[in-house]
Amino acid sequence: MSKHFVQRLFAAVLLALAAGGAHAGLFDDDEARKQIAALRAEASANQAAIQKALDERIAQLDAATKNRAVDFAQLIDGLKMDMARLHGQNEVLIHKFETAERRQKELYVDLDTRVRKLEKLFQEKVVSPEQEAQKEKEAYEAALNQFKVGNYQASAAAFQTFVVNNPNSQLVPAAQYWIGNAYYAIKDFKVAIATQQKVVESWPDNVKAPDAMLNIASAQAELGQQNSARATLRALVAKYPASPAAKEAQQRLQKR
């Protein structure tokens, strides 16, 4: 209701009261009642218009609120779906991470096990040759010591056993050489020659080959084969001219 309308209604009421009290004036009772009725009608109309406007506004607000509620609900549903999707993705990522971490640990354990096995195998392969080399050396020296103390038969037997037990040893040529020397020492010159010839033929580049030829010449001389002995000495000088055995061979040739 407007302020102007209230002022008009208040003035009309005063006018009616004044007219009724004095029984005279510009307006009579009927006129006053008409004006009041008209003002009431106008007030009612204004009130109805205002109420209608308020109802329309409320309806608009309610509709807007409902629309917004729908939007909010959709938004909330969308957020819930996104959260559920993100949660699912997170679960997948966690599972993948745990799987990868477990696989990494398994690979580490497997790798560590393999490395340990390789280290053990490597140590066994390294230690084994060293142990074998030590055994070979000990067996060789034991047979040589028998020769040094004059046990030629025992020395020859020990060296023959060494050759059989260690066919791939680098000491085999030297062992064969000492077998020939042992047979020479017990005056079995034919066996001594055959044994030393094997050294020359099988290992011509070995350091013992020149000495084996010199011993062959010595055994030939003991058997009275002087021509063969000289031929062996000349072959020794020709084949191994820089060796100490060649110098000995030259000295023997000069004496004969």
Image: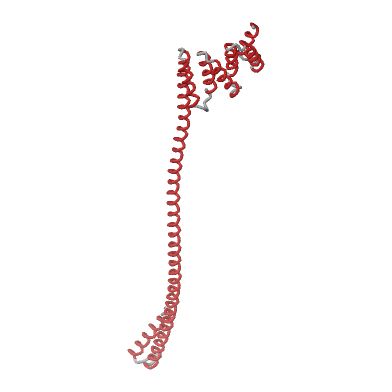
Q: Quadrant of the C terminus?
A: top right
Q: Nearer the viewer, residue 188 or 172?
A: 188
213 to 169, vertically: above or below: above
In terms of image quadrants, where is residue 77? bottom left
Q: Residue furthest front?
A: 224
Q: Quadrant of the N terminus?
A: bottom left
Measured as percent of width and height from the top left, residue 121 is found at 46, 35
In terms of image quadrants, where is residue 15? bottom left
Q: Nearer the viewer, residue 218 or 11?
A: 218
- Residue at screen point 41% across, 82% down: 47
Measured as percent of width and height from the top left, residue 90 is found at 44, 57
Q: Is residue 214 left or right of residue 131?
A: right
- Residue at screen point 57% across, 20% down: 194
113 to 237, vertically: above or below: below
Report how many numbered discs are placed on residues in the image.
0
Q: Nearer the viewer, residue 31 or 79?
A: 79
Q: Is residue 210 left or right of residue 128?
A: right
Q: How is the image coloured?
A: secondary structure
Measured as percent of width and height from the top left, residue 86 is found at 45, 59
Q: Is residue 207 left or right of residue 109?
A: right
Measured as percent of width and height from the top left, residue 46 is found at 42, 83
Q: Residue furthest top?
A: 255
